[in-house]
Image (spheres, rainbow, N blue to C red):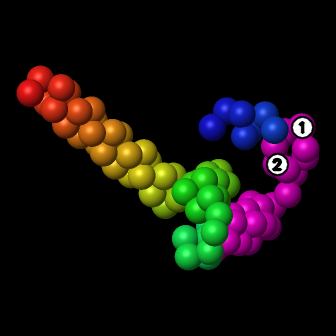
Amino acid sequence: MKWTQNLGDRLGWNLLPQTLRRIIVGVIGGTIVLIGVALVVLPGPAFIVIPLGLLILGSEFAWARRLLRRAKEMIGKVRGQRVDEVAAEEKR
């Protein structure tokens, strides 16, 4: 993620020890994901907030990047299926 490295250089983020950086990112990203999970049952845009939290976590954690990649693949599959279903209905 090139843009995060550039931003980190400008803000001095890369001067912090890696452990401290991971703790800060974990707390902020985890809090945003938990807010997103709460928004699943509360009125609000959970489908925007949860990926945003995973994006923040993905800047430091590989497991969050993998989870975000899987979600993108699943969304692509769902969209592809819908397009195929719509095309099949139009042919009828």
Q: Is residue 11 left or right of residue 23?
A: right
Q: Quadrant of the C terminus?
A: top left
Q: Residue at x 42, y 52 (%)?
A: 71
Numbered label attached to residue 14: 2
Mostly what secondary structure, the magenta segment? helix
Q: Residues within 10 Å of mark 1 (few under 14, many from 20)?
A: few
Q: What SS does tag 1 mark?
A: helix
Residue 33 visible in the shown view? no
User: How many numbered badges does the structure rendering display?
Assistant: 2
Q: Position of residue 44 (x, y in %)?
A: 65, 64
The answer to whether mark 1 and mark 2 are in CB contact below 8 A is no
Q: Position of residue 55 (x, y in %)?
A: 61, 52
Q: Residue furthest right?
A: 11
Q: Is residue 79 left or right of residue 41?
A: left
Q: Is residue 76 left or right of residue 44?
A: left
Amino acid found under the numbered disc labelled 1 = Arg
Q: Which residue is mark 1?
A: 10
Q: Quadrant of the N terminus?
A: top right
Q: Residue at x 77, y 61 (%)?
A: 21
* 53 and 44: which is toward the camera: 44
